[in-house]
Image: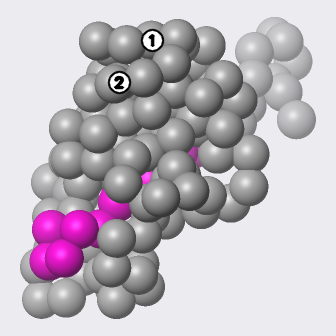
Amino acid sequence: MTPDDGAPAADSQRLFATPAGVKLGAVAAIPAGGARNYVVQMRAGRFHGFVVREGDEVFGFIDRCPHMSLPLAQVLDDYLAPAGDLIACSWHGALFEKSTGLCVGGPCVGQRLTPWPVTVMDGLIVTT
């Protein structure tokens, strides 16, 4: 639904940042070495991101490939290459380091995923 002026409704706006302190859920919800999608609904719109877990560490990124600005996964939570060692864009095959988001293969080599600052506090993933 849009307002009468033709602008998109606030809740349909795609946001590219979240405030600090948003509790996303238990780190245990992400398998070791895995990734998970998170959509955060805020008053101004929705934020789409994902978190990769490596042991006790988590790395968050905005769910948008630098190559074509599309979400990386065509299937929910399917962010990793088959070997599980890299993040993969399912649209055009770009490959990214899990901890840094640096593109190491595909059409956007040298570019990076946009970081989404997250940490683990008391077993929960929290935005920072």
Q: Position of residue 48 (x, y in %)?
A: 53, 45
Q: Residue at x 68, y 60 (%)?
A: 76
**Residue 18 in sight:** no
Q: Is residue 91 left or right of residue 102?
A: right
For the residue labelled by badge 2, is the local secondary structure a helix, a strand or a loop? strand
Q: Is residue 8 left or right of residue 33?
A: right
Q: Tell me how far mark 1 sits from mark 2, CA to CA.
A: 6 Å
Between 25 and 88, the one lying in front of the other is: 88
Q: Is residue 38 above or below residue 66?
A: below
Residue farthest to the front, as pictured:
83
Q: Residues within 10 Å of mark 2 (few under 14, many from 20)?
A: many
Which stretch is magenta?
Answer: 46-57
Residue ID for mark 2: 103
Q: Position of residue 93 (x, y in %)?
A: 60, 29
Between 32 and 11, the one lying in front of the other is: 32
Q: Is residue 46 above or below residue 55?
A: above
Q: Residue at x 81, y 24 (%)?
A: 3
Q: Is residue 125 left or right of residue 1?
A: left
